[in-house]
Amino acid sequence: HSSSECDHAVSWRSSNVSTKISKDWGVISEQDVTLVLTLDLHSHDMSNPDNNQVLLKILEANIKAWHTSPVVILVRVSGPKEVASFASNRLDELIASRSKYLVGLIHDDEIGNHMEGPSLNSMLNMAEATVRTRWVISGMEVNRGLVLSTEALLFSRRMIYANKGSPNGVYILGQMIFESNKAL
């Protein structure tokens, strides 16, 4: 039996985590499906404006595809305060006109370019723990370049309706719900 300690533990209550919550975050319906998105930005990503813009456009496209359904966005920013400030301002722009959101920004200026910090799995677990709906689309790491199609929410709701009353809790949505991010 072996164990290891995590040197980079983080929670929603950590001092380096800032949150933004919509007023209607707690208002959900039986048909709501929450989209969980994670994004990992490092200061070297921010120094390359093209890479930075692509990641933020992918995030924006996924948020727009989810229309007015709940979304949890967790972004980790490693680097100086200016990088975190830029990311925070851009997140404000992305959520300005939407409802039902919870956004978390993890900032660690000590990590810098060392690519350390909370793992993507721990970020995903942290984001999933806040979901207030029964149904969740999870595993959407923006860094992988996945973009939901505009029909993804419709397919998700159809799956829920078709299986209403079923004890099953996990459904796989086909790859057809993704679009190419080359158009971004």
Image (spheres, rainbow, N blue to C red):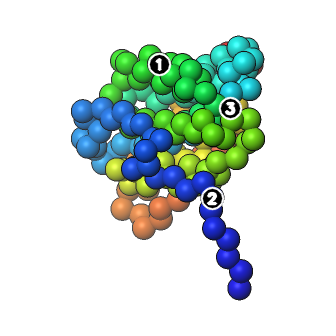
Above/below status of 89 relative to 37: above
Q: Which mark is residue 89?
A: 1
Q: Dividing the image into 4 quarters, which one contains the C terminus?
A: top right
What is the x, y in percent for residue 57? Answer: 61, 19
* Label 2 with label 3: CB-CB less than 8 Å: no
- Residue placed at 33% from the left, 35% from the top? 21
- Which residue is more in the foreground, 163 or 68? 68
Q: Is residue 35 visible?
A: no
Q: Secondary structure at mark 3?
A: strand
Q: Secondary structure at mark 2?
A: loop
Above/below status of 39 relative to 182: below
Given the current orientation, which residue lies at the most extreme bottom position? 1
Residue located beneath label 3 in the image: 42
| 160 on left or right of 47 | left
Amino acid beneath label 2: Asp
Tell me which label, 1 or 2, sits earlier in the chain.
Answer: 2
Q: Which mark is residue 7?
A: 2
| 4 on left or right of 12 | right
